[in-house]
Amino acid sequence: MNELRLPCGRETRKLVWALFLGQVVSLLLALGSLASSLIADLGVDAPLSQSLFAYVLLAVVCGGIMLYRRQRLLVPWYWYLLLGFVDVQGNYLFNKAYQYSSITSITLLDCFTIAWVIGLTRIFLGTRYSLWQVLGAAICVVGLGLVLLSDAGVAGGGGSRPLLGDVLVIGATFFYASSNVSEEFFVKKKDLVELIAMLGLFGAVVSICEICIFEIKSLESVAWSTEIILAGCGYTLTTFLFYLLMPLVMQLHGAALFNLSILTSDMWAVIFRIFFYHQKVDWLYFLSFATVAVGLVIYSTTGKDPDPVPVNGLDAQYQTINDEAENVDP
């Protein structure tokens, strides 16, 4: 049986730094969720446009650094196009869910990402997980099931169509998990600045294309006000900072610690729901939060990191991308 092993010395300082950054990311996620919820409450249904400016800001800032360095791409552009598409779909479903469900349910169900991460890395990268880690993930799923139970009417979840909102969030977590696995892979094997710049660039390109197809009429019907603009600016700023820090946390200690860190955003969501929306939070939410916390702690503290299978696994995937990158003209 795997045992809990505490790091020491330099590893301890690295872990503390990662935990600190993780809590900053968690607060940014909660603030972004609050801004998205406010935008929905103001009658704006434009989730693609909502994320567009954050992608543009990422592309301008980190793309400018790449131009200053005069560096060529270390990864072929079409891999980043796929990553941008996946990330945009996750943000779209996540922001769309605020039209139907409460901020508390959405932020709790966002933890479903870790279950998808386990499945995706096992299937596509051949990563092996211990029984304790699988148990921890299973406990998380049980905790998230309590949210669905509450939103189904047993405890009276918030929102106009909470179950639809919950389904949208679960769909978003699948895309987020796909994006997280890809980002952790690229950030550990390649370049952090390039990853953020290309994610911003292709995220913006995909967003603009989908806005032109799906969201023009929604934008035309928006009655713009100071409150909407301020909420949109708040969402853009918090999302921009979130994307800057998220790969750094993954680079330090991987996606598992990242997902564990952002769990505390649920506590912020409860505070926002009580003080900003003056809504009561049912006891099932607190039970769900406690259950998810136990599951993630078990997952993240049971021995070593997951072991990748070297054949036809992560190393093979890396070698394929690396070979393609060497064939790209400088």
Image (cartoon, rainbow, N blue to C red):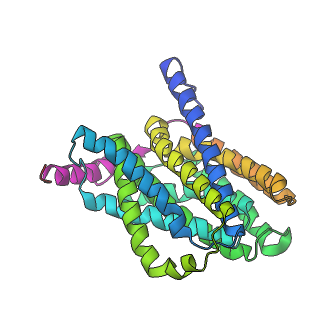
Q: Quadrant of residue 301?
A: top right
**Picture coordinates of residue 136 (x, y %)?**
63, 49
Specify whether 284 is left or right of 253.
right
Regarding residue 126, the answer to whether it shows in the image is no
Magenta residue check for 305: yes
**Picture coordinates of residue 260 (x, y %)?**
60, 44
Q: Is residue 54 above or below residue 100?
A: above
Magenta residue check for 183: no
**Picture coordinates of residue 233 (x, y %)?**
58, 55
Q: Residue furthest top?
A: 9
**Picture coordinates of residue 85 (x, y %)?**
40, 66
| Residue lying at 54% horizontally and 64% vertically, measured from the top left | 50
Regarding residue 283, the answer to whether it shows in the image is yes
Q: Using the image as rendered, state which of residue 235 and residue 157 is in the foreground.
A: 235
Q: Quadrant of the N terminus?
A: top right
Q: Quadrant of residue 192?
A: top left
Query: Magenta segment, which residues?
Result: 301-327
Q: Is residue 102 above or below residue 31?
A: below
Figure label count: 0
Specify whether 101 is left or right of 181.
right
| Residue lying at 70% horizontally and 62% vertically, measured from the top left | 38
Q: Using the image as rendered, state which of residue 255 and residue 172 is in the foreground.
A: 172
Q: Is residue 72 above or below residue 50?
A: above
